[in-house]
Amino acid sequence: MSDVLNVSEMFGKNVFNDAVMRDRLPKSVYKKLKKTIEDGAELDPSIADVVAHAMKDWAIERGATHYTHWFQPLTGVTAEKHDSFISAPSDGKVIMEFSGKELIKGEPDASSFPSGGLRATFEARGYTVWDCTSPAFLREDAIGVTLCIPTSFCSYKGEALDKKTPLLRSMQAVNEQALRILRLFGNTTAKRVAPSVGAEQEYFLVDREKYLQRKDLIYTGRTLFGAMPPKGQELEDHYFGAIRERIGSYMNDVNKELWKLGVPAKTQHNEVAPAQHELAPIYEGVNQAVDHNQIVMETLKKVAGRHGMACLLHEKPFAGVNGSGKHDNWSLTADDGTNLLNPGDTPHENIQFLLVLACIIKAVDVHADLLRESASVVGNDHRLGANEAPPAIISIFLGEQLEDVIDQLCSTGEATHSKQGGTLKTGVDILPDLDKDATDRNRTSPFAFTGNKFEFRMVGSSDSIASPNTVLNTIVAEAFKEAADILEKAEDFDMAVHDFIKETLAAHKRIIFNGNGYSDEWVAEAERRGLPNIRSMVDAIPALTTDKAVKLFEAFGVFTKAELESRSEVEYENYSKAINIEARTMYDMASKSIIPAVIKYTTQLAASIGAVKGVCQEADVSTQTELLIKTSKLLTEIRTALAHLLEVTEKASAAEGGKVQAVVYHSQVVPAMEALRAPVDQLEMIVDKELWPMPSYGDLIFEV
Ligand code: ADP
Ligand code: MG
């Protein structure tokens, strides 16, 4: 059968991966490159020409005409500028060229990317720098075939202007400190410890024709108006439901595209909300995982177009049904394959694991504000702290088994046993008995231990996972360092490590919470425990520039103070811009399509009343009259709300930039938008469907 899908042949077909490099590079060059990729050695620039040449030949054989440095500026999406391989014509002919210099360094005009004041516009220089640890790949689309080279993006002075550079720095930090922990336990052979990450990606699919009839979706990625359909997600019949043909054929295409690009797409299923789905790849090294998640997002959008659909990555495209997030599964793996977060069967005896766990608990407790900040993106304000999963309070779920071990340690000073899962009995003879996990799941926890990894569930669906992982790596590096500084000097290591674990857990166990994270009781309890409850992006951003944060990031060379300040500036700016666009889109939709439609409806009602009465004085027109009164009243409310929205939006856009401006958008424009939405949504339930100027929620989420 020729049409059988040969996945193993297809996988990585468009990637300049290890196998291709081994095949195409001279042995000495391959070895040097591997040393950088695997051991983190400095890149030897003398090999660049050879690598560039091999890369170019490989790409051209596969139809490439252009190459691009692919980077991740602070806009949150990837950026690229394409150059063709052609040389200057000589005798009217060109050859295809690509030098080591072009591979290693690019110079996009940096002034058009956000820098938060790091760079004045007259100092426009910015460089993209080849990241050889993330393989180059070929993208095939309408433009043709393009060789994409993952790069970092820095200013003339070497300040990070992107998401990748700090991530790479944080990987170095956690590597160095984690190795110290391994050495304490006698591991002398491990050479590297790197974070492993698997990012589960949620998204919505809607019909493209309908999408194009909604300016809010086009301009802002979410609906700014919309009444709930008679059916929402209450039946929970969509979660893990059978995947329909149209969606199935889309997922099939997405998988093929991703596999060709070496992205290990693994699971797919329907999510809780109607029209919501999820894709999860197999976990990889964090740098790859971050790049691959960007590719996943791009691919989801691109392929949707081909199937007559639009993919919505926004955190909250529809009010009233679940929003979308991204679960960032994180663990630490040594080059010998050991997962530092693997508790084994008897965690109470696994002292190295308990030390690692204690350090992570401490890190998350001390820097809960930074973790929360790292998941802040404008759309996520509708999830975190807004009656939706997960809550805005950072807490850790450990599960019964580990919590019990910790209780033993903290109460008696000694942990003597680990609870075991036992056997799952179904009561049906023909079904096999299964070994149960030692711990059930908790879906409400923002930071949950799930067997041999932590799952950080706050990240927004549209956001890059670079920042959360940069923070995680760095805060854990700090906790490891503090542990190693003490334990390396200990005379009696066994005693010292035991005491250290006990003291650390006792000091930080307030962050552990195994109950229902959505309950009001938890909000009150968390407050009693002194845990921060940061409800919005604008409230979260200051965490970036506290003395605590500056000290942390400078100590590990991840960010300078200036870089942190610039990032906080960029985030305030992103916030203000996004809300400004939303407010203006609402204004536009309300005044140009909703109000005219409502007026048409009231005119019809009035005409009906007149016509009926004209024919028959005694006829009852109370229904029409009541509707007319109600509609007119709501119309007046819209007019008032609209005037107010315009006023505060103008005030906000005139405000001084940065934090001041973002606060005005948050505290005045956002409520004004809500006030406009309320009467419009009520009217949508009243006005003749034929007249309503856009597809309804029902049309969008139930008729894909
Ligand atoms: P669930 O969320 O149901 O636990 P999985 O166990 O399949 O789902 O894992 C979800 C994601 O976590 C996947 O991307 C998976 O590859 C990733 N993952 C699994 N083990 C690890 C690990 N040790 N470190 C990091 N990510 C992991
Ligand atoms: Mg998960």
Image (cartoon, rainbow, N blue to C red):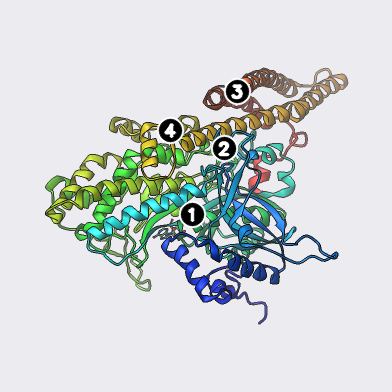
Q: Amino acid at mark 4?
A: Thr
The single residue placed furthest to the bottom in the displayed view is: 1
Q: Nearer the viewer, mark 2 or mark 3?
A: 2
Give x and y (percent) for residue 188. Answer: 27, 65
Give x and y (percent) for residue 275. Answer: 60, 50
Which of disc 3 and disc 1 is earlier in sequence?
A: 1
Q: Nearer the viewer, mark 1 or mark 3?
A: 1
Residue with the mark numbered 4: 545
- Drawn side of residue 364 relative to residue 247, left or right: left
Residue drawn at the location 59% of the way across and 62% of the way down: 136
Mark 4 CB lies closer than 8 A to ligand 1: no
- Graded by Cα atoms within 10 Å as few (under 14), some (14 to 19) or many (20 or more), the crowding at tag 4 reads some
Q: Nearer the viewer, mark 4 or mark 2?
A: 2
Residue with the mark numbered 3: 672
Give x and y (percent) for residue 372. Answer: 43, 39
Element type at mark 2? loop
Q: Amino acid at mark 3?
A: Ala
Residue with the mark numbered 1: 199
For the residues marked 1 and 3, what is the alpha-carbon distance in whole angstroms? 35 Å
For the residues marked 2 and 3, what is the alpha-carbon distance in whole angstroms? 30 Å
For the residues marked 4 and 2, what is the alpha-carbon distance in whole angstroms? 16 Å
Element type at mark 4? helix
> Quadrant of residue 103 in the image?
bottom right
- Graded by Cα atoms within 10 Å as few (under 14), some (14 to 19) or many (20 or more), the crowding at tag 2 reads many
Q: Is residue 112 above or below residue 64?
A: above
Q: Is residue 549 above or below residue 425?
A: above
Q: Is residue 490 above or below residue 638?
A: below
For the residues marked 1 and 4, what is the alpha-carbon distance in whole angstroms? 27 Å
- Graded by Cα atoms within 10 Å as few (under 14), some (14 to 19) or many (20 or more), the crowding at tag 1 reads many
